Amino acid sequence: MLEELRIKKRRVVGFKETLKALKRGEVEVIFVSKDCDKRLREKIVDLAKEEGIRIEEVVSRKVLGELVGIDVGAAVAALIKKTK
């Protein structure tokens, strides 16, 4: 699953983009960094749980940013469901 985060077409990165994708029902799995801001974390995690979406923790924002191929940290990212 983590390797799939590198595929740009199948992911969203950042709180706002992830939240939008969650609300549209497009998310397969959420990745949240352990050092994510508590308020943001609770909002994303609560919504993901309501929707029955799997939540994976990543060690840090720095590591998540590296996984998605950006030069800065990322608090949240998500894999988008595969389209047929």
Image (tube, rainbow, N blue to C red):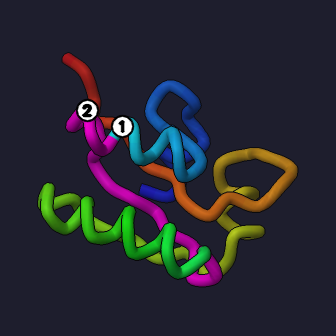
Residue 37 counted in the magenta span: no
SS at circle 2? loop
Q: Residue at x 47, y 77 (%)?
A: 57
Q: Amino acid at mark 1?
A: Ala
9 up-or-down from 76: above or below: above
Residue at 57% over, 82% down = 34
Q: Are marks 1 and 2 in contact (CB under 8 Å)?
A: yes
Secondary structure state at the residue bearing disc 1: helix
Q: Residue under circle 2?
A: 24
First to last magenta residue range: 22-36
The N terminus - image quarter: bottom left
Q: Residue at x 27, y 40 (%)?
A: 23
* Kind of residue at badge 2: Arg
Q: Quadrant of the C terminus?
A: top left
Location of mark 1 (residue) = 21
Q: Is residue 49 left or right of residue 74?
A: left
Q: Residues within 10 Å of mark 2 (few under 14, many from 20)?
A: few
